[in-house]
Amino acid sequence: MKLIIGLIIFSVLVAGCISPDVKTGDPMQYELPGMENTTIFYLNLSSTQVIDSVINQTSVDYRIEDSIQTFRNPVAVDYQGNNASVNVTIKTIMGRNYAHFNFSTNFTGFVAYTIPGGQDFNYIPESNRTIRVVLPENFTAGTMFLGYIQPDPDNITHDALGREVFIWNNPTGQKIRVRYHYKDTPELLLYMFGFLLICAVIVWLYYYFSISALRRKRKMLERNIRK
């Protein structure tokens, strides 16, 4: 009996548990189509939009790093920009959550979905493909102490909207990390440092002249006492 129960538990863990369907989104909210054999991350402070190319697949899985509620608005379109029939569910396998895209037929095109965003981006590619990370407008990541890009991208460019784009070719197994900030942040910090420096000088001068005045008064009092 224990053996049977153990086999059932093992089968559930291996096969995974499937949650109800995830509501699909509107393709118009994404920058579609994407690029072949490329995963594109459009970063934002509040969310990240992911565009991934799929070639002749009946299903694909994407690991969910945060809670399953944060995986939102999945869509699928073919190369002509037509909506594809897709059913998206959340699978739990060995304690890890995956978004399972199940297509009605062999599908070639692009899938897109939304996950949480922020100024720190981390991603480990699991297959050989090109990775493109697109920063929000008026943001950068190359300033020392304020941002970083790891590993060094194979190419850095700008798109039609002036956004910085970092490109890695087949970085399988390497952890991609990008921390970005407003382009004006270094200048604002410089102004703030200058303001604090001026305040420090004013305070120092105030105490210097105050102490000097006290010393003069003390000398005058000592002279009067001696007289």
Image (tube, helix red, strand yellow):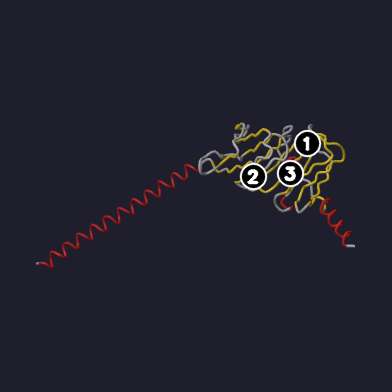
Disc 1 versus disc 3: nearer the observer: 1
Q: Residue 54 carries which label?
A: 1
Q: What element carries label 3?
A: strand
Q: Badge 2: few (under 14), some or many (20 or more) residues near its Cα, within 10 Å?
A: few
Drawn side of residue 198 relative to residue 157, left or right: left
Q: Is mark 2 on a helix, strand or loop?
A: strand
Q: Residue 19: tell me if it is visible.
A: no
Do tag 3 and tag 2 residues touch (Cβ < 8 Å)?
Answer: no
In the rendered image, which quarter is residue 190 located in? top left
Q: What residue type is labelled 1?
A: Val
The answer to which of 35 and 126 lies nearer the viewer is 126
Drawn side of residue 151 relative to residue 101, left or right: left
Q: Which amino acid does label 2 sit on?
A: Asn
Label located before the other in sequence (1 or 3): 1
Q: Residue 113 carries which label?
A: 3
Residue 5 appears at what percent x and percent y?
87, 60
Instruction: Report the residue at 67% width, 32% height from top.
Output: 169
Do tag 1 and tag 3 residues touch (Cβ < 8 Å)?
Answer: no
Label located before the other in sequence (2 or 1): 1
Q: Is mark 1 on a helix, strand or loop?
A: strand
Q: How far apart are marks 3 and 2 (CA)?
A: 17 Å
- Residue on which disc 2 sits: 122
Residue 117 appears at what percent x and percent y?
65, 47
Counting every numbered tag in the picture gives 3
Q: Distance between the residues labelled 1 and 3?
A: 13 Å
